[in-house]
Amino acid sequence: MSSGFEEIGERVYLLRQPALDVNVTLVVGDGEALLVDTLSNAAQAGELAVAARAITPYPWTLVNTHHHFDHCFGNATLAGEPARPIYAHRAAAARLREQPELVRQQAYDEMRDAEPLLAAELLRTTILAPTHPVHLESTLDIGGRTVVLRHLGRGHTDGDLVVEVPDADLLVAGDLVESSGPPSFYDSYPLEWPETVAELLRLAGPRTVIVPGHGAVFGVDGVRAQHEQLSTLAWLIRDGHADGAPPERVAARAPFTPTATMPAIHLGYAALSGDT
Ligand SMILES: [Zn+2]
């Protein structure tokens, strides 16, 4: 059971779903609202809808920060009838529209051992693809509030969107940064990720609130620290590849756990060898 939304900025609210510690952000304007990310399944999304309705009666537009199940499998429940618009980066939107069963299978494989009940539910969840693909930038008017959706480059995936709420000095970063665990590299572009987070930092001021995909909100210092770790890892991968070092030796020196880091090294090595 989720604990409900808490205000983290002017008419901006955060719900932290205990399962996987996923964040959902609610932005409320005059007569209209925006929900960023929709959780993992119909049950979680149903609870999320109840929690959001405790904050606002207004219709909401949806955003998926990327295509991973814990950020978009609640779409079908939350879009309602007639369906509300759903924004996502065009790569994420295309994957959910054209290859939903592949996305579902990857999600199932990822969760099967750690969360078998959740994994089984993923097989039954209706996947609703985003309706509004974003290429580089899209500016929304949410009941008189400007909200900017930006793709800052490849990183956690090839289709991460950042949601900027300028009048609240707030950025929703999706899984480009995480505070409850190490970054998740299995779908990532580890050599490009640092520059994408550098772009995120360029959007942030000294007091900007930055909502990670998982875990407690960051200030700019927390994101700067994660940027340094990602940069360190990218250079370890480049050096290791140049030296022909086995991935395990690179992982032992990385700023994240070896288990978290190994996919990054394999993907980074493949990119440097021209295999991707
Ligand atoms: Zn993710």
Image (spheres, grey):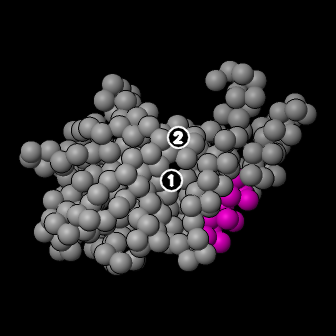
Q: Residues within 10 Å of mark 2 (few under 14, many from 20)?
A: many
- 53 and 100: which one is in front? 53
Residue 178 in picture, x, y percent from top left: 54, 60
In magenta stretch: residue 228: yes
Residue 42 in picture, x, y percent from top left: 21, 50
Which amino acid type is marked by label 1? Asp
Task: Determine which residue is flagged by label 1.
Answer: 175
Left or right, 14 with respect to 129, comes to: right
- 103 and 157: which one is in front? 157
**The magenta segment:** 220-230
Residue 6 in picture, x, y percent from top left: 33, 78
Q: Is residue 100 above or below residue 34?
A: above
Residue at the far left: name it: 81
Which amino acid type is marked by label 2? Thr
- 46 and 230: which one is in front? 230
Q: Residues within 10 Å of mark 1 (few under 14, many from 20)?
A: many
Cβ–Cβ below 8 Å for labels 2 and 1?
A: yes
Task: Determine which residue is flagged by label 2.
Answer: 157
Q: Secondary structure at mark 1?
A: loop
The answer as to whether callout 1 falls within 8 Å of ligand 1 is yes
The residue sitting at 35% across, 37% down in the picture is 133
Q: Earlier in the sequence, mark 2 or mark 1?
A: 2
The residue sitting at 73% across, 59% down in the picture is 228
Q: Is residue 44 above or below residue 89?
A: below
Residue 82 in picture, x, y percent from top left: 9, 45
